[in-house]
Amino acid sequence: MGEIDEMLSRNLSTYVLDVLEIALSLPEDVLDKFILPKRGIYLSNSIKPILNLEENRYYFEDGKDVSNLEEILYYDKHIIDFRGNVVLTNEKIRRIRNILLDKPNLPIIALEFIIKDIENFFYNITISNLNVGDNDLSKLLKNPNELKEIEAIVNIHNKDIYSNLAKFINEDSFSIYEFIEKGNILVINKKCDYRIIEYYKLREQISKLEK
């Protein structure tokens, strides 16, 4: 591992946040403002579909298309992807049939909105981040023109979070921040000052030129 990779692998401090708590605190009329989640098959209390029917095609083992939950529970057959790989066996379907849903029972779009809003917070007040950009939150709303209104409501429910995040950043606006999503948990790692990385990159370039 090179010097730069070693520095980037080291976390100076970490902030862990359960975003679902914030999403669940939002009023129902606000949750209704978000776009519908991806069409698919979900487990109860899950964040992502186990079968994403909106973006992928799945088949029963006899070649029939999988189109909805009712069919899955009725046919009692293995489910395969377009490559022919089994993604759900009929035995597993029998075991989890009572917790299978055709739409999530958690506010997962609101959760995504909050995570991206937090990423934007860092993007706007820090200099360098490893894996976030300026997210367009309006894409997550049924009516993009209501963005400022929804942001204001979400921020009211988020105000203590942003205060704590500002304390976490402190004066380290030049630090590199890494964002890792683990279901409803957002992990934010503070790493070294990005100017140190730039110095080592420049030193490596000079070293190559001198050879």
Image: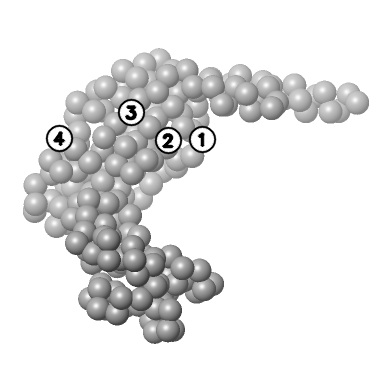
Q: Is residue 25 above or below residue 97?
A: above
Under circle 2, the secondary element is strand
Q: Are marks 3 and 2 in contact (CB under 8 Å)?
A: no
The local crowd at label 3, few if under 14, some if 14 to 19, many if 20 or more residues have their Cα within 10 Å, is few
The crowding category of the residue bearing disc 4, from other C-alpha atoms within 10 Å (few below 14, some 14 to 19, many at least 20), is: few
Residue 167 x, y percent position in the rendering: 31, 18
Distance from disc 1 to disc 4, alpha carbons, whole Å, reads: 28 Å
Residue at point 40% right, 72% down? Answer: 79
Q: Amino acid at mark 2?
A: Phe
- Give the farthest residue toward the front: 91
The residue that mark 2 highlights is 179
Of 111 and 199, nearer the camera is 111
Task: Quadrant for residue 94, please give it.
Answer: bottom left
User: Percent from the top left, x then y, of residue 194?
Assistant: 56, 24
Circle 3 sits in a helix, a strand or a loop, which is it? Answer: strand
Helix, strand or loop at mark 4: helix
Quickly name the residue at label 3. Answer: 16
Badge 4 is on which residue? Answer: 156
Marks 3, 2: nearer the viewer: 3
Distance between the alpha carbons at the discs numbered 3 and 2: 10 Å
In the drawing, does residue 16 fall left or right of residue 152? right
Work out whether 144 lies above or below 57: above
Extreme residue toward the right, this view: 211
The CA span between labels 1 and 3 is: 17 Å
What amino acid is labelled 4 in the image?
Ile
Question: Which is nearer the N-term, disc 1 or disc 3?
Answer: 3
Disc 3 marks which amino acid? Answer: Val
Q: Position of residue 86 (x, y in %)?
A: 46, 68
Q: Residue at x 24, y 23 (%)?
A: 163
Please name whichever residue, 51 or 138, is drawn nearer the observer in this view of the structure. 51
